[in-house]
Image (spheres, rainbow, N blue to C red):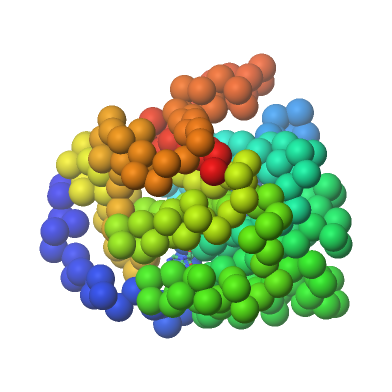
Amino acid sequence: MSDDSRNIEQPDMQESRPKTPSRMAEGMAMHRLAETMLPEDVRIFSDPYAVHFINPEILKFAAEHPRKAEQKVREMKNLFPGLGNSIRARVKYFDLVLNECISHDFAQLIILGAGYDTRPYRTPEIDHNFKVFEVDHPETQSVKKEIIRRIFGTLPDNVTYIPLNLETGDLDVALSSSCFSELKKTLVIMEGLIMYLSSDSIHRIFQYFSKECPVGSKILFDYYPESVVSGEKNEYAKNIVKFTQLNGEPLKFGIPDHAERNFMSQWNFADIRIIRSEEYKNLLFTGKNADRSVCDFLSFMEVTI
Ligand SMILES: C[S@@+](CC[C@H](N)C(=O)[O-])C[C@H]1O[C@@H](n2cnc3c(N)ncnc32)[C@H](O)[C@@H]1O
């Protein structure tokens, strides 16, 4: 592949507030829909609401031109080998951690960069006493709220929507002026988020939760190494860099290669668990799924406060 990513007009990295809803969030919903459409004995999760977050024109195109749609999927798989499966493994793995937390008396879930995450609506274990806080750019969140209202007729009482740019807004002020309780065990999910934030914002976020959440709370997120975000790792990394730039949501942050524990040590977390691609593949893609390859760029981290 030719490296013409350097010729792409670079979006202004200071201007991180999108004027339109996140296309990446829609892309994630597409992965969830595609997984949901697999045969029952193959799919690793089911998301009945994902379809509502996809542009109807795209769904119409796929229904009318299945061959062309399949060709597109093949092209994406060639550009980003295994990444789709890693994204779907991430959904399943994060679902498992959420359920584990709920069964261990966690009372709150904060989803930063929630996009069109449907966990608060499709997780039977989340009842009306379990508080959820969804944070995202106002442009993306307002679309989400409109769609949730359309699906359910109303917004759920237990979900608080916080429209906030995590780069420029104050998460501390936003959460403390909501019904978030600093006394209750909390799971913080950042799924497909930190690669889109500046290093400063990420430091603020970890600093805030390490101080404001009670002991035993968790932060769950995924990340790329620095060499992927810079594109230096290989041609597939360059493809990711280029694709995200073209979609107006450029990658900004990667954790220093092979130095995750050192990077995380600055916040004195009680425990850090790194889940690399090999581990989540072995855990989630077994039996009929054993030949589903994953992308070794994407790792998950489960941090206990
Ligand atoms: C790849 S999408 C992931 C969405 C969702 N977590 C999921 O996995 O389906 C990234 C999300 O992060 C949000 N995001 C990126 N930068 C942000 C910022 N500075 N402030 C708030 N949200 C942000 C985007 O709007 C988008 O919804």
- Percent position (x, y) of residue 148? 74, 72
User: 298 or 188: which is nearer to us?
Assistant: 188
User: 305 or 114: which is nearer to us?
Assistant: 305
Give the side of residue 155 with respect to residue 172, left or right.
right
User: 272 or 226: which is nearer to us?
Assistant: 272
Residue located 55% across and 39% down the image: 304
Residue located 19% across and 57% down the image: 5
Residue 228 in the image: above or below residue 42: below
Note whether residue 225 is visible: no
Give the side of residue 207 with respect to residue 184, left or right.
left
Residue located 64% across and 61% down the image: 182
Figure quadrant of the C terminus: top right
Give the side of residue 251 with respect to residue 234, left or right.
right
Residue 198 in the image: above or below residue 280: below
- Percent position (x, y) of residue 19? 42, 82
Residue 37 in the image: above or below residue 23: above
Residue located 84% across and 49% down the image: 124
Looking at the rendered structure, the number of numbered marks drawn on it comes to 0
Figure quadrant of the N terminus: top left
Name the image quarter holding residue 49. bottom right
Note whether residue 184 is visible: yes
- Percent position (x, y) of residue 76? 42, 46
